[in-house]
Image: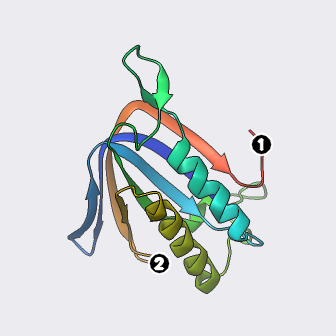
């Protein structure tokens, strides 16, 4: 599983001109399920998202997680994180999981984050979405359950 995590002051999703989700301060997470991902990958990602200490404490150090600041998480499915452009200029998405399984695992991610009693909003799976955000910092972190950065 791959994710781009952005610390935000606010973020929202629109589908077909209608606002479907919005959060105030917290995390915007663009997440993709890869072929071969398992519930172990989902659990790792859920824990990492909830525990990631990228919010500043009273000393100005990144030492707090989203729960500690009273924030929320907006989870948006984005299979294009598995786009591979090493050959040519048109991305191949062969590394992305098939839609039915990807949706099942993405919904597990949402459930696992909600189990931590965090406010969670989502985009709409397989929809064309307009995602808006106000970066805070900006702070952007790349996560991959299979790779070390």
Tell me the CA gap for discs 1 and 2: 28 Å
x and y percentages locating residue 61 in the rendered image? 47, 19
x and y percentages locating residue 112 in the rendered image? 53, 65
- Coloration of the structure image: rainbow
The answer to whether residue 6 is visible is yes
In the foreground, 126 or 3: 3
Asked which quadrant contains residue 55, the reply is: top left
Residue extending farthest top: 59
Which of disc 2 and disc 1 is earlier in sequence? 2
x and y percentages locating residue 54 in the rendered image? 49, 33
Residue at numbered disc 1: 148
x and y percentages locating residue 46 in the rendered image? 57, 57
In the foreground, 102 or 64: 64
Horizontally, residue 94 falls left or right of residue 26, namely right
The quarter of the picture where the N terminus appears is bottom right
Asked which quadrant contains residue 45, the reply is: bottom right
Q: Which residue is drawn at the image coordinates 40% and 22% (left, top)?
A: 57
């Amino acid at each position: 599983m791959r994710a781009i995590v952005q610390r935000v002051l606010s973020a929202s999703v629109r589908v077909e001109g209608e606002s479907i989700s919005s959060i105030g301060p917290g995390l915007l997470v663009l997440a993709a399920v890869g072929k071969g991902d398992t519930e172990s990958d989902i659990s790792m990602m859920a824990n990492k998202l909830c525990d990631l200490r990228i919010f500043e404490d009273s000393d100005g150090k990144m030492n707090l997680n989203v729960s500690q600041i009273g924030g929320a998480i907006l989870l948006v499915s984005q299979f294009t994180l598995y786009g591979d452009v090493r050959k040519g200029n048109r991305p191949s998405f062969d590394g992305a999981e098939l839609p039915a399984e990807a949706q099942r695992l993405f919904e597990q991610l949402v459930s696992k984050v909600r189990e931590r009693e965090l406010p969670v909003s989502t985009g709409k799976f397989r929809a064309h979405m307009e995602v808006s955000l106000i970066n805070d910092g900006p702070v952007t972190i790349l996560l991959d359950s299979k790779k070390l950065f």
